[in-house]
Image (cartoon, rainbow, N blue to C red):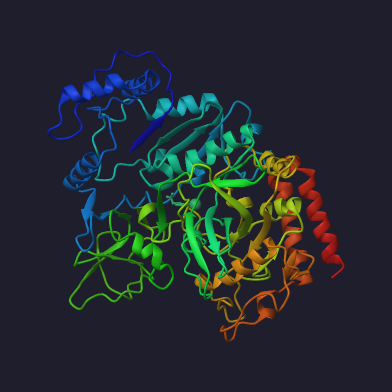
Amino acid sequence: MQKVIGRLGGCVPRVPPPAAFQRGGSRRKAGKRWGLCPPPARQFVEEGVRLCRPRALRLCDGSPAEGAALLSQLQAEGVLHPLPKYDNCWLARTDPRDVARVESRTVLVTERERDAIPPKPPGGGPQQLGNWMSPPAFEQAVQERFPGCMEEPLVSQWPCDPARTLVAHLPDQRRIVSFGSGYGGNSLLGKKCFALRIASRLARDEGWLAEHMLILGVTDPAGKKRYVAAAFPSACGKTNLAMMTPALPGWRVHCVGDDIAWMKFDAEGRLRAINPESGFFGVAPGTSMRTNPNAMLTVRANTIFTNVGCTSDGGVYWEGIDQPVRPGTTLTSWLGQPWTPGDPQPCAHPNSRFCAPANQCPIMDPAWEDPEGVPIDAIIFGGRRPEGVPLVYEAFNWRHGVFVGSAMRSEATAAAEHTGRRLMHDPFAMRPFFGYNAGQYLAHWLAVGEREGARLPRIFHVNWFLRDGAGRFVWPGFGHNARVLAWICSRVAGEDNAKTTPVGLVPREDALDLDGLPGVSYADLFPVSRPFWEKEARELRRYYEENFGEDLPKEVMGELSALEERVKKM
Ligand code: O2Y
Ligand code: MN
């Protein structure tokens, strides 16, 4: 599966007009559509055709009829399997080698390495903040992959080329070139590649922010509504939070987006956010009517499931779906093998996904498609931290908030090729998605905070994933996270209900509503211990030095030193 966006140099012969796409569609109509294409688009297509040499060229119009024709064709080719238990839902099983984003093969191509990544760590370890490729190396990589690639015989129903996968970004030219993977973020080029990597570069150049953040609206029992944006590393529950059903009576949540936020200042100095996507590409395992009923209701129609298990009555199945399988029904794993509960391997791949239209979510915000965006009152950072990091704390100010974002760490997830439960640094949840040098990215955030007339959102950090000595979660999470949103809203409203710790401002004991949560104790939720934060600060200093080097803004290093001083005085 190959995709090209952008110009791929070279002088090549004329390309004939495209063949009709739809069965029954006419060649004349397709030719007319081709004639209506803007010249740069035609030139782009022509170059791609000459390079890749496809058997036919099809111009898509995005119509429902075309969508239906594509689905039937993919079914006939064995790529998609219908799921008759639902309405227009489909199962795709990928090549088992093509199941997640491939960070090691995701590159930024710039003339100067320093424009893409901070200096390499001393000792030559891999740079964790992105991969750089030089323009000549990129040209060579293109020549080694693309010429004639669409003439090649298909090797399976899921064409991919894992050994040669390359997801390249050319931020100076706003180009993306992706080869060898048909999976998610590697091939849905409008998502991570454009809406985060290329857009973060556009945002820096133009003075706005393109972020790995959900956006939600939260309304209190008195009807006061506020919007928050939240950055969590991949597969840390962003979709669950974005679609949350509050466990606090009278509170409501509406979803604007679950993954990406573009935020710009308006004329009044307020940061306004839009969701640049039109659908959700959420993790299936763990999603259930208990954990995320709105997601379950969203995916009952017009949804493509990838690498989930299926039931013999035409339904889907995954770990944690929490739905009884009807007697007599058999299960098939994501690998297409018979599967029974208790089998050692999971039924669904841990990074299996649903891809569904956003407008099917029952709690989409009325303003979710407003081109003006929604006004953001609070920005939340978070991660999976089993110990030491409080349930919630507020940054002292914007600069401290930028430090908090830069210091984010989380347990690794299945969304990329990393494995295991180890803690990974993930500044701003953007580690895999920076479109330029991460040090310059932090400097851009600091500059945003200096903008004249800006009415800046408050910044918070949350951790839903604290565990006790026996390894059990100490916070019930899901709908109960509304209790934390309620405190955040009270802070935005200016309530004086926080106490200062060396780490940040935490709710006073009476300010966080823990009613009806037996066994949940304030003390367990707000550990702030000197040995833990000494170790955390040491590790952070090492990480900054090795990964950002001299590109770390001095303000951020200053915040780390200030934290160390506060911790010393504990
Ligand atoms: O793109 C993929 O293949 C999985 S990763 C993903 C998908 C949807 C939303 N976010 C992510 C992510 O890794 O952050
Ligand atoms: Mn994401």
Q: Is 442 left, or right, of 233 in this rendering?
A: right
Q: Quadrant of residue 494?
A: bottom right
Viewer-nearest residue: 555 or 529: 555
Q: Residue furthest left?
A: 24
Viewer-nearest residue: 470 or 546: 470
Q: Is 352 left, or right, of 154 in this rendering?
A: right
Picture coordinates of residue 411, whole percent (x, y)? 57, 62
Q: Is residue 394 above or below residue 65?
A: below
Q: Quadrant of residue 496?
A: bottom right
Q: Quadrant of residue 25?
A: top left
Picture coordinates of residue 30, whole percent (x, y)? 21, 25
Q: Is residue 479 above or below residue 451?
A: below
Q: Residue at x 60, y 66 (%)?
A: 485
Residue 209 seen anywhere in this rendered image of the structure: yes
Picture coordinates of residue 78, whole percent (x, y)? 20, 48
Q: Is 169 left, or right, of 181 in this rendering?
A: right
Q: Residue furthest front?
A: 222
Q: Residue at x 50, y 34 (%)?
A: 169
Question: How many marks do you count on the picture?
Answer: 0
Q: Is 22 left, or right, of 120 in this rendering?
A: left
Where's the N terminus, which quadrant?
top left
Q: Residue furthest right?
A: 569
Viewer-nearest residue: 381 or 412: 381
Q: Residue at x 59, y 78 (%)?
A: 474
Where's the C terminus, which quadrant?
bottom right
Residue 128 seen anywhere in this rendered image of the structure: no
Picture coordinates of residue 211, whole percent (x, y)? 57, 46
